[in-house]
Amino acid sequence: MATPSFLSSLKYSDSLTVVGISICTAVICEAISWVLIYRTNSYKSLRSSIDKAAKKLETMKTESTTAKITKKSKTKKIDRVETSLKESSRDLSLFKFKSGAVVAVVLFVVFGLLNSLFEGKAVAKLPFKPFGLVMKMSHRGLQGDDPTDCSMAFLYFLCSISIRTNLQKFLGFSPPRGASAGLFPMPDPKTN
């Protein structure tokens, strides 16, 4: 019982509560992802194939630029490796999709809980006056005209993005180097 009264006596208690819940949510989401994705053998094999293909592609491209001799067979090999890398990246994205649904449900529940706790209440003060669109997001659901008031939704959004991304990097769960294509890769200009 001493903890809630201690937090409520702090000047920034609402902000610290939102940041703390955001940290806990990020840890829970990464634990769910670890259980459903990162510990499986299929994820590990996909990741290693992406890493190998990315390294092979990188060495092939550096060799072709240093040689300055463009051969048709060399470009075909590079295209094959690029295609294999894109397919593996797509497969990895589809594989991650199932845990994304579970994580989305967790985030939706936590956001609903926080929204009911801090409805219409400013949880932080911004050190600047935000412009147009950012002000609409940061002042969402708040009464009053002070543009430096920050709503729970904006603070939670910023914390979730930064904490979860950094936690993934720290734990080594960030996407492989060559897996930037995702589910919807950019069209290949060579085929157009």
Image: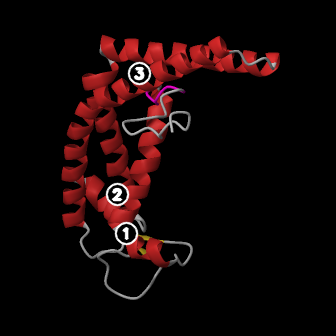
> For the residue labelled by badge 2, is the local secondary structure a helix, a strand or a loop?
helix
> For the residue labelled by badge 3, is the local secondary structure a helix, a strand or a loop?
helix
* Residue in front for this viewpoint, 70 or 152: 70
Q: Give the residues drawn in magenta, as a range.
A: 173-177
Q: In the displayed structure, would residue 15 be above or below residue 43? A: below
> Which residue matches tag 2?
18
- Mark 3 or mark 1: name the one nearer the start of the chain: 3
Q: Does the CB distance between marks 2 and 1 fall below 8 Å?
A: yes
- Mark 2 or mark 1: name the one nearer the start of the chain: 2
- Residue 11 % position (x, y): 42, 68
Q: Is residue 172 left or right of residue 116?
A: right
- Residue 113 % position (x, y): 19, 58
Q: Does the CB distance between marks 3 and 2 fall below 8 Å?
A: no
Nearer the viewer's eye, disc 3 or disc 2?
Answer: 3
Is 176 covered by the magenta stretch?
Answer: yes
* Residue in front for this viewpoint, 145 or 36: 36
Give amino acid for label 3. Ser
> Could you give the CA–CA distance between mark 2 and mark 1, rounded to whole angstroms?
8 Å
Residue 151, quarter of picture: bottom left
Give amino acid for label 1. Val
